[in-house]
Image (tube, grey):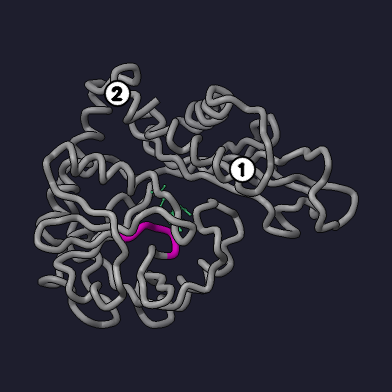
Amino acid sequence: MSIAYLNGQLLPIEEAKVPALDRGFLFGDGVYEVIPVYAGRLFRFKQHIARLENSLQGIRLPMEQTLQDWANICHQLIEQNSLNNASIYLQITRGAYPERNHDFPANPSPTIFAMITALPEVQAVPSDRDLQGISVITAEDIRWQRCDIKAITLLANCMLKQQALECGANDTILVRGGVAFEATSSNLFIVRDGVIITPPLSEHLLPGITRDFLLWLAEQHGILTEQRLIPEHELLQADEIWLTSSTKEIRPVTRLNDVTIGNGTAGPVWRQMYDHYQQLKVQLYRGEIDSNTEGEIAL
Ligand code: PDD
């Protein structure tokens, strides 16, 4: 049974309970992070916590926890659950109060919850499933205007994902006014003539930590990148399409609205980036990357 963290306590996840009057439950009033753990070490932790702080600021919920406080919670979960490859889900809501009231409480007492889930081991060679890629549809983005905040209010994301499943696809690329921004739980990349292209940061997409990491990794290996808007019609002209997130890493898209992308399997630039990503994880496992010298990579 998995051990979770709730408001200062470690306990079996089935016993982690929050009051029905918690604003997370009543209003979806909270934010979250999903942080990968490779080789028992938090990956890009500083960046995840910086984004958490931006999200907290975005919903005007000040917290006094330091980077080290957040790290302690995560390390306890890693140790208690003896997991080396995992993702940590960390959620903060504005807490529970005696009445349901839309007004923000004057002195908030937030609820902090965290749990850990196993991730697959490093895969030096992509599986057939990876190479096959996924199938996506496009749909109008019905979410709010602050998609840069990692809010727990994910009903629109769930509806848009379900729409894909009901069409026999795996996910949905979200479009606003003819422009594609991201997918329901991942960022969007395309490749054209060897250049990796992703939309610039704005209130219409989450500033993905994997997105940022891939731009950095591509630069390290001399692969050209460009941050610009991607009109929906350009998706079909792309040589490759990828979706990226902390848990999916880089996922190739090989069908879009029932049209084949590229030659219908993961493309060559994806393969290059896949290899660079896995190589870096291997270096973490071997202890070749040190948290002090590679603060950019891991804490
Ligand atoms: N989702 N865009 C959206 C809407 C997301 O929900 C996510 C992450 C991303 C990618 O961000 P990152 O690279 O930092 O994981 C982009 C997480 C994994 C989730 O909801 O489970």
Q: Is residue 13 magenta?
A: no
Taking the image as drawn, is residue 1 in sight? Answer: no
Q: Main secondary structure of the magenta part?
A: loop
Please name the residue that numbered disc 2 is placed on. Answer: 294
Find residue 235 and report its image quarter.
bottom left
Image x and y of residue 87, in percent: 44, 42
Confirm whether residue 13 shows in the render. Answer: yes
Q: Amino acid at mark 1?
A: Leu
- Report how far apart the C-alphas of labels 2 and 1 lie in the structure: 27 Å
Of the pair 40 and 297, the residue shown nearer to us: 297
Q: Note whether 67 is above or below 234 in the view shown.
A: above
Which residue does the image show at 35% across and 77% down from the upper left? 137
User: What number is the disc on residue 56?
Assistant: 1
Residue, x 44% and y 56% (percent of image)?
A: 202
Q: Left of 59 or right of it: where is 149?
A: left
Q: Nearer the viewer, residue 36 or 56?
A: 56
Count of picture labels: 2
Residue 242 sits in quarter: bottom left
Magenta extent: 184-188
